[in-house]
Image (tube, rainbow, N blue to C red):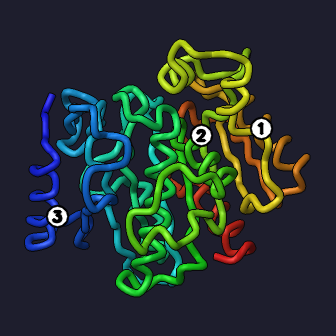
Amino acid sequence: MTRMTRRTVIAAGAAAAAAPLRAQGSAIERLPIWPALPPGGERIRVRDEFVKRSPDGPPDDIAWPHVATPMLNVVPPGQSNGGAILLIPGGGYARVAVGRTGSPQAWAFAARGFTVFELLYRLPRDGWAAGPDVSLQDAQRAMRLIRAGAAKWRIAPERVAAIGFSAGGHLTARLASRHSQRTYEPVDDADRQTPRPTVAGLFFPVITMTEPSAHAHSKRELLGGDVTPARVARFSAERDLPSDMPPTLVAHAADDPVVSAANSLIMFAALQAAKIPSELHIFEKGGHSLPLEEAGKDHPWPGLFERFARRHGM
């Protein structure tokens, strides 16, 4: 396990600006999303730590069980279409499965012309004052920071989607449905921006905290021992969807052995009941993932999301 202090991470970010990390031939920018200590951390002593996801895996195949310095990886497009995507990875709220050189999913959407921002977010397990809302704080801040920097990154601030995977799908669903919830006090001019995504994509997402469909690991990490009915309802992402929730696409594999596809069915039913423009795809195979390739051909899910997103303002 590798530990990194906030000073080390920020210094590394500055070094990256001078000598950028490179993947697939393009430069990666990495930046902290808060200008100083993130909100609610005055009494905690958490440090950034990452572990390899597999002993024999690639060097950048890592996950973060503790996050003190929330970051964005900025994956540039080959030829920009003016749109941006906030990509929120999973990890069961026990860790964040994101590297430092851009995930294959990020590069796939960058190849389609989107500037992709991968989020390394804080976790409830580390004792932040916001508790289960700490990850939502970071997601809201990331959306605002992206829009505030639209001119720098040459994107249209009205064309910023959010997509999430597994527990990141739960966080994306909450970002989309709780965009009006004030989770922290403004810290700078970036916080004048709206955190509402233009479009949302939820891929093999954790959604509900209710039984029997709840993902037990995510529920435990998010809620701890406080599983009162009111708390379970509050953090079930399908509950109380607002009329201004962005158009949302949901996709899952029927054979997912980790997060039941019932989560996606529950979410789609809630979206339809709330009259939110929405689309659902249940693929026969895929496990707890949706691959970029299948049988030597491109898997359809990125194209399906892009088509849906363009239909709704992207």
The residue wearing badge 3 is 21
Where residue 290 sits, quadrant-wise, is top right
Closest to the observer: 102 or 74? 74
Labels 1 & 3 near each other (Cβ < 8 A): no
Task: Tell me the amino acid under the disc marked 1.
Answer: Arg
Q: Nearer the viewer, mark 1 or mark 3?
A: 1
Task: Tell me the amino acid under the disc marked 2.
Answer: His
The residue wearing badge 2 is 170
The residue wearing badge 1 is 239
Report the side of 122 relative to 268 (left or right).
Answer: left
- Residue at the outermost top position: 225
Q: Secondary structure at mark 3?
A: strand
Q: Residues within 10 Å of mark 3 (few under 14, many from 20)?
A: some
Q: Residue at x 48, y 61 (%)?
A: 86
Q: CA distance from mark 2 to mark 3?
A: 30 Å
Residue 209: which disc?
Answer: none
Residue 223: image location, x then y, percent: 54, 22
Q: Secondary structure at mark 2?
A: helix
